């Protein structure tokens, strides 16, 4: 499972055009919008990791799995932005198992809701749109 | 039901198929097997205050003691589902396995169901 939210960014083209026409630094603004959205995802991930939500008497809510939650950082490759979310698979921990489940353990419902549902994707898209709209409003005043 | 149709398709590949999480904690895994999980069923589209179609998003996991089999079976599953109307946007991704003997590959697949019983407007 991709530890990424699958978001179609084409819906932000209109905002990008408006911002460009207003002389904004698009990379700086998208950086901010993506980082704020990613921080919300990671907060929701940490909340979903509360012991009461997890199997095995909540042992994954502490230790290596919690430590493997990534700190969001936007990386640009040309005009493509990438933000790592969820758990760092290069570190030990059970984060991946909690999202995908295993043949012996169902996926964790709260983490699954974050990383695999359209409802959550819509919420994050809306947050990005709000940030972009705020930046447009600031420049139109 | 869409899931039943999916299971029948997957079973035609002659490997055990079950829901993710359905093996008991003491069970031994088959050498090669498939699991599935249906995380989301959003409405597909809206028009005139009515929704049209339900999206069935399903994660399919392929586990095998042979990494070659894990990859080749992933391709077989992908080809089979595409031939039967499913959308399979990627060739798959690695997943962690809780068995040291097994490698895992995953696929995210999707189909839109426009049938009467799933469409609340009809």
Image (tube, rainbow, N blue to C red):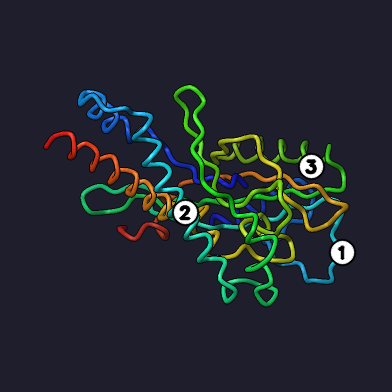
Residue shown at the point (18%, 39%) measured from the top left: A138
* x then y, percent, for residue B9: 66, 48
Q: Please, is residue A107 above or below residue A5 in the view?
A: below
SS category of the residue bearing label 3: helix
In the rendered image, which quarter contains the C terminus of chain A? top left
- Residue that label 3 marks: B70
Q: Residue furthest left?
A: A141
What is the CA distance from the residue labelled 1 to the residue labelled 3? Answer: 18 Å
Q: Position of residue B27 (x, y in %)?
A: 84, 68
List the residue tagged with mark 2.
A41
The crowding category of the residue bearing disc 3, from other C-alpha atoms within 10 Å (few below 14, some 14 to 19, many at least 20), is: many
Judging by the rendered image, the residue that carries numbered circle 1 is: B28
Q: Which of B6 and B72 is in front in this view?
A: B72
Q: Mark 2 lies on which chain?
A: A
Task: Return the chain for callout 3.
Answer: B
Q: Which secondary structure, mark 2?
A: helix
């Amino acid at each position: 499972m991709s530890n990424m939210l699958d978001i179609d960014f084409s819906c932000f083209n209109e905002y990008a055009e408006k911002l460009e026409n207003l002389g904004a630094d698009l990379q700086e603004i998208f950086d901010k919008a993506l980082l704020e959205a990613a921080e919300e995802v990671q907060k929701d991930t940490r909340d979903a990791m509360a012991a009461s939500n997890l199997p095995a008497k909540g042992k994954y809510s502490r230790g290596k799995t919690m430590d493997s939650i990534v700190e969001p950082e936007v990386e640009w490759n040309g005009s493509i932005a990438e933000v790592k979310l969820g758990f760092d698979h290069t570190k030990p921990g059970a984060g991946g198992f909690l999202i995908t489940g295993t043949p012996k353990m169902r996926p964790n419902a709260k983490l699954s809701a974050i990383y695999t549902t359209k409802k959550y994707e819509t919420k994050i898209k809306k947050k990005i749109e709000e940030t972009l709209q705020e930046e447009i409003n600031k420049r139109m005043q | 039901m869409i899931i039943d149709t999916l299971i029948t398709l997957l079973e035609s590949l002659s490997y055990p198929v079950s829901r993710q999480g359905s093996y008991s904690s003491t069970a031994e895994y088959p050498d090669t097997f498939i699991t599935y999980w249906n995380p989301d069923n959003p409405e597909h589209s809206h028009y005139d205050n009515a929704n049209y179609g339900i999206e069935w998003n399903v994660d399919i996991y392929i586990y095998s003691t042979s990494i070659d089999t894990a990859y080749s079976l992933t391709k077989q599953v992908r080809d089979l589902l595409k031939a039967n109307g499913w959308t399979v946007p990627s060739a798959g991704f690695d997943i962690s396995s809780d068995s040291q003997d097994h490698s895992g590959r995953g696929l995210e697949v999707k189909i839109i169901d426009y049938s009467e019983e799933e469409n609340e407007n009809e």
